[in-house]
Image: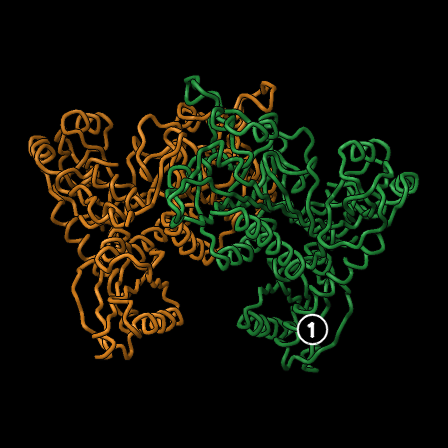
Chain colours: A orange, B green
Amino acid sequence: MASEKKLVEQITSMDEDFAQWYTDIVKKADLIDYSSVKGCMIIRPYGYAIWENIQRLLDTRFKETGHENVYMPMFIPESLLNREKEHVEGFAPEGAWVTMGGSERLTERLCVRPTSETLFCEHYASIIRSYRDLPKLYNQWCSVVRWEKTTRPFLRSREFLWQEGHTMHATAEEAEAETKQMLGVYADFFEHDLGMPVIRGRKTDKEKFAGAEATYTVEALMHDGKALQGGTSHNFGDGFARAFDIQYLDRDNKLKYCHQTSWGVSTRIIGGIIMTHGDDSGLVLPPAVAPIQAVIVPVQQHKEGVLDAARALFDRLKAKGIRVKLDDSDNSPGWKFAEYEMKGVPVRVELGPRDIANGSCVLVRRDNREKKFVSLEGIEEIVLAELDAMTPALFEKAYRHREERTYNADTLDELVKIASEKTGYIRAMWCGELDCELTLKEKADVTSRCIPFGGEPTGDRCVCCGKPAKHLVYWGKAY
Amino acid sequence: MASEKKLVEQITSMDEDFAQWYTDIVKKADLIDYSSVKGCMIIRPYGYAIWENIQRLLDTRFKETGHENVYMPMFIPESLLNREKEHVEGFAPEGAWVTMGGSERLTERLCVRPTSETLFCEHYASIIRSYRDLPKLYNQWCSVVRWEKTTRPFLRSREFLWQEGHTMHATAEEAEAETKQMLGVYADFFEHDLGMPVIRGRKTDKEKFAGAEATYTVEALMHDGKALQGGTSHNFGDGFARAFDIQYLDRDNKLKYCHQTSWGVSTRIIGGIIMTHGDDSGLVLPPAVAPIQAVIVPVQQHKEGVLDAARALFDRLKAKGIRVKLDDSDNSPGWKFAEYEMKGVPVRVELGPRDIANGSCVLVRRDNREKKFVSLEGIEEIVLAELDAMTPALFEKAYRHREERTYNADTLDELVKIASEKTGYIRAMWCGELDCELTLKEKADVTSRCIPFGGEPTGDRCVCCGKPAKHLVYWGKAY
């Protein structure tokens, strides 16, 4: 059977070559395919179904916190992009530019949106008049384009899918509260739905978003010890509002500038899930976003009663709202085990003639791969309990891994030594000066990941220059 | 109060100037806004929420019929677009072309997708090997770009949102069955969810999709008598499969070309809803896609107990799954009545002190605007019943309107006369020759809308040349 070949094609071991292991998984778990469009990816049904689950879970949280979805044009006229100086400097160099419409040369180039602050600002300027119009809490689900030189599926591609929230507020305090609230929404989603522990913190000025006053971030640590920025939330103050003249008439009859935020997560999250939970058998998916939460694999399915029992089990699990699949194809059980492990399906239920005779079945959870013999009576509750238990278990494992991979450094030599020997977070104090940040990049090849909220200081001197320290910083290598 | 001004700004009457009436509604019902990107529109929260409901209802139907969602790149290399000759001739003239990436000129121009057949074909060629891989039933929700010269919100814009299904089949029969099935899905959606009667039929060769063997269509008639193509479903035969070399190994061990379909609907649907059901008070939304299905307007809300009763009513309706809004803002009830009529909210519930004392409320349905005094006891069922009754009533009204606006013509003179005096469908026989189609366009300014499935012939001679007729055709002016 042609498809059985798959079993033989093992994926690269993660310890041997993590990058190749990653590439193997995205291909062999049928998440993506390449096309002739360089640097862009095709998100295949199984990969897209993960994204749909992410969208649904986040969109519900966004709506619960009062946000509304909109759709802005995908093009930004060059003059509009130029309105905010820092912003255009950050994004114009990686713009994809439309210069022809039909057979005619455009009088002004259009940038395919790399992010939509400028479009939202122009719109807000046209619809905001009074304090009664505030806050405006908009979000957009769309694709964006950044002309990257080197690309990797999900992690860095020229086009990617994301959501971008853009909000306008009457006061600086409200904007700051919104920025923090949305960071909290992301952190909650990562930790509770994806089982990915995150460090919440603030970016240094060097690492913050082009045009933002402050960028907050949730940072996750991958299996190989490299950091992944999971989501960011930006407070723009009134910088864009001044550039775009977005004013409102306040209760005191005075015109005031609005305060603004934006926040986003992207299909990068899928890369993060792979590199946090995956293993040498393939993907491991948190149940909340798994397209298939439980797969039923009949054993000796040609024997009388097996498929009937499997179908009855399917109906029972489906009735409980579990996303369940029954694989009654003529591939062997062994092939199916490998296939659904590769695809990271959280729970596998094996059901053969002997099990049926005993009124039981075999249950295997993807993360710990323990075999459990369980009664078919009340099987729905058992599967639901395993699904519920899996995400905290994934979280615990990832949390322990992060703790083991987090090091403290008091001196530059120490930091350089750790960075050369280990990959992980290095906690070290910082004076707040760009020079020291650049020195660490040059000598240890690390960047500042974030200034954590409420992290315990490890000392009172800058790890680099020895001057009084202002912040604890998580340093590391990042995707 | 600034916002009360709205009441005074009446919209243009539809009989006076239908185009202006349409433009007034899309702006005043807060569906869209313009931006500095010429020919593109901003879909505002209220408009986008309608689209989200359309998406949800259609996506459920697509998944029930076995389709899976994917995401393809938004760019098509020029050489890829050129692979199918008729297709590129149809779409290249209205392409938006990316020629610069960052600061570098691209070696090959990229077309922002006007439709994605070529990308799907390339992907299918890489993943289809055997009859076991078929059928492939993919769909994509995305935005597409066509560089139109004249644009109108929802009806014709340079960028619009849509879904495009692309499927691959082993046989011609299966592809034809899929094409018809998806047309049926569209027809069902239009008629049952949107209350819009449609004519199901086939496009003439002149009007079919670039590269298709057959295009099927659902055609709706707008209030002004002009036709709107609601959705199309194309059978490509194996034309693209040959151009892209998409072959599968069949059971008989022979390599065969796949048969292909595509089908799509877009944000045009929203324009169709406006022009089918709207009136001089604004939008009229079918409950299935209305962002707000019922609005509660408290009367004399400052009086004791009114807002409490309104909130209790809100909770009861919400508990039944009704999308309900309570407007307790300090705008006057009269302002609110006008506002929610403009926004097309299906059911309005008015609740004042006297109603509360009587244990009743006033219920007004948007389409017939009859006032009903109903008991608060069992109000949930009454509102649900009104919502259920509204769509068939909308359908009936639109159906009668279409019947009144449908004319038969036996001769060219008759057809020209009808076309000059009336706007609507003209049913007339056709020989099947392009020349006659062009003559009707020239003399009567009508195009063929479709060859209806199972329409009763009105004669046996072509209305134009008098030769034996092959088909009954619906002719008309179209959006």
Chain under disc 1:
B
> For this view, does B240 lie left or right of residue A12?
right
User: Residue drawn 42% across and 23% down?
Assistant: B101
Rendered location of residue B350, percent (x, y): 69, 69
Which residue has dot 1 on it? Answer: B352
Picture residue at 37% right of the left edge, 53% below the top: A185
Instruction: Depth check: give the residue in front, A453 or A394.
Output: A394
Q: Taking A473 as reference, is A74 left or right?
A: right
Q: Determine which quarter of the picture holds residue B352.
A: bottom right
Residue B21 percent coordinates (x, y)? 77, 45
Percent x, y of residue A83: 50, 26
Total marks in image: 1
**Is residue B300 in view from this perspective?**
no
B42 vs B187: above or below: above
Residue B43: x, y in percent? Answer: 59, 44
- Element type where label 1 sits in the image: loop
Neighbor class of circle 1 (other Cα within 10 Å; few <14, some 14-19, many 20+) is many
Is residue B100 at least partly visible in the picture?
A: yes
**Foreground: A170 or B138?**
B138
- Residue A284 versus residue A407: which sits nearer the camera? A284
Check the image and report above or below for B392 versus A434: below
Q: Residue at x 49, y 34 (%)?
A: B242
Q: Nearer the viewer, residue A400 or A209?
A: A400
- Residue type at numbered disc 1: Gly
